[in-house]
Image (cartoon, grey):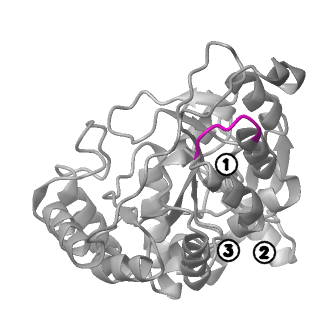
């Protein structure tokens, strides 16, 4: 493989066509070659922040096999660049590619806190846990600049409303003050994603995420402050990280996680093409083996849309992964459980002076 063909610091190595667009524009190879010979950069590989103005921010989740009812995403696209991310396909709805665009064109919803407040103060709203990052990470690098997630947490605290968080970024510890206060009312639960104990693997799978040690420290610090943590050991990718499951479970348990969850990787939509291109460049020696193992988990295909099976997989390899998960729970999580969040404190429309009556 030509080293110039591999873009370090990114997951996807190209932009795939957007299925919603009639016309596709791409750089011709002869132009790219001309740029190389002239010492010019055809593509500067920089991240672009693009403000957008949605009318709503809270989404109802209709999928029967997803463990949440409502989600919200302050950002669309994610600079973390995880190569397997199911959210890549959603970027096509915004007119971009699920490939490099997903990592480099980040859509910013600055009005998210105001939209959230409008939603949860409505007199007809009944409190249900709203999960931040149901699609893209609410603590990705953009959050350091825009602080939208922190402002949303302040809204949840103001209205005593339960919130779940999914992240793989240690930046969440910046907001430990708000998290501790939310937790004093049993209003917050945190899900930390840990997919490998190998930095080499992490850098390839998730190039712009926090290191493994930082993630384990994040679990430890949150747990030491009695904030409940569930570890997302997902996705399990046979031939890449599935063999680490027992060690991963022990590591997150030792650092205070109360539970863990797994999924078996599936590569739906454009992700199949993006992942296949990536693994042939990043791990050429095992590319075909890994792709065949994934196919074995999904009835001969790398994608799977069957509710109930799509995240679990089927067949011998998927069964072995779930057997390891059951063993891990027996060994490392006996007597532990993740608590239910409190829905009874929410005051939907008693704001300001109305609380005096």
Q: Indicate the quadrant containing the C terminus: top left, top right, bottom left or bottom right.
A: top right
Residue 278 locus on image (x, y percent):
49, 67
* Image-based side of 175 in relation to 237, left or right: right
The magenta region covers 158-164
Residue at point 69%, 30% (across, down): 57
Residue 6 to residue 57: above or below: below
Q: CA distance from mark 1 to mark 2?
A: 29 Å
Q: CA distance from mark 2 to mark 3?
A: 19 Å
**Residue that carries the numbered disc 2 in the rendered image:** 36
Closest to the camera, between mark 1 and mark 2, is 1
Q: Is residue 159 magenta?
A: yes
Query: Which residue of the protein is positioned furthest toward the left in this rendering?
Result: 316
Which residue is labeled 1 in the image?
A: 77
Instruction: Look at the numbered disc 2 and give the secondary structure of its residue.
Output: helix
Q: Residue at x 23, y 65 (%)?
A: 292
- Could you classify mark 3 by the number of other residues whose Cα lies within 10 Å: few (under 14), some (14-19), or many (20 or more)? some
Q: Where residue 24 sits in the image (x, y, percent)?
A: 65, 38
User: Sequence order check: which comes first, mark 1 or mark 2?
Assistant: 2
Q: Can residue 88 be found in the magenta stretch?
A: no
Q: Position of residue 110 (x, y in %)?
A: 84, 39
Q: Which residue is mark 3?
A: 9
């Amino acid at each position: 493989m030509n080293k110039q063909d591999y873009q370090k610091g990114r997951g996807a190595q190209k932009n795939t066509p957007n299925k919603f667009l009639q016309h596709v524009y791409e750089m011709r190879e002869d132009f790219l070659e001309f740029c190389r010979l002239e010492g010019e950069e055809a593509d500067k590989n920089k991240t672009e922040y693009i403000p957008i103005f949605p009318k709503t921010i809270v989404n109802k989740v209709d999928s029967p096999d997803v463990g949440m009812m409502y989600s919200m995403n302050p950002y669309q696209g994610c600079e973390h660049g995880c190569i397997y991310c199911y959210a890549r396909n959603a970027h096509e709805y915004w007119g971009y590619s699920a490939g490099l665009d997903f990592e480099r064109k980040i859509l910013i919803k600055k009005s998210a806190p105001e939209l959230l407040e409008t939603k949860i103060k409505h007199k007809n709203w009944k409190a249900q846990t709203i999960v931040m990052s149901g699609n893209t990470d609410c603590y990705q690098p953009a959050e350091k600049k825009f602080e939208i997630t922190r402002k949303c947490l302040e809204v949840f605290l103001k209205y005593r409303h339960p919130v779940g968080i999914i992240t793989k970024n240690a930046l969440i510890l910046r907001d430990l003050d708000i998290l501790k206060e939310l937790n004093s009312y049993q209003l917050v639960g945190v899900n930390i994603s840990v997919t490998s104990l190998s930095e080499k693997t992490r850098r390839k799978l998730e190039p712009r995420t926090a290191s493994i040690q930082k993630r384990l420290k994040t679990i430890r610090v949150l747990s030491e402050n009695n904030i409940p943590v569930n570890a997302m050991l997902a996705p399990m990718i046979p031939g890449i990280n599935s063999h680490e499951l027992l060690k991963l479970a022990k590591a997150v348990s030792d650092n205070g996680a109360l539970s863990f969850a797994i999924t078996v990787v599936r590569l739906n939509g454009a992700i199949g093409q993006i992942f296949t291109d990536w693994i042939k460049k990043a791990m050429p020696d095992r590319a075909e083996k890994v792709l065949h193992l994934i196919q074995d988990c999904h009835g001969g295909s790398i994608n799977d849309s069957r509710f109930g099976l799509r995240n679990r997989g089927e067949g011998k390899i998927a069964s072995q992964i779930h057997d390891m998960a059951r063993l891990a729970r027996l060994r490392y999580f006996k007597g532990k459980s993740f608590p239910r969040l409190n829905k009874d404190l929410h005051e939907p429309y008693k704001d300001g002076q109305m609380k005096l009556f």
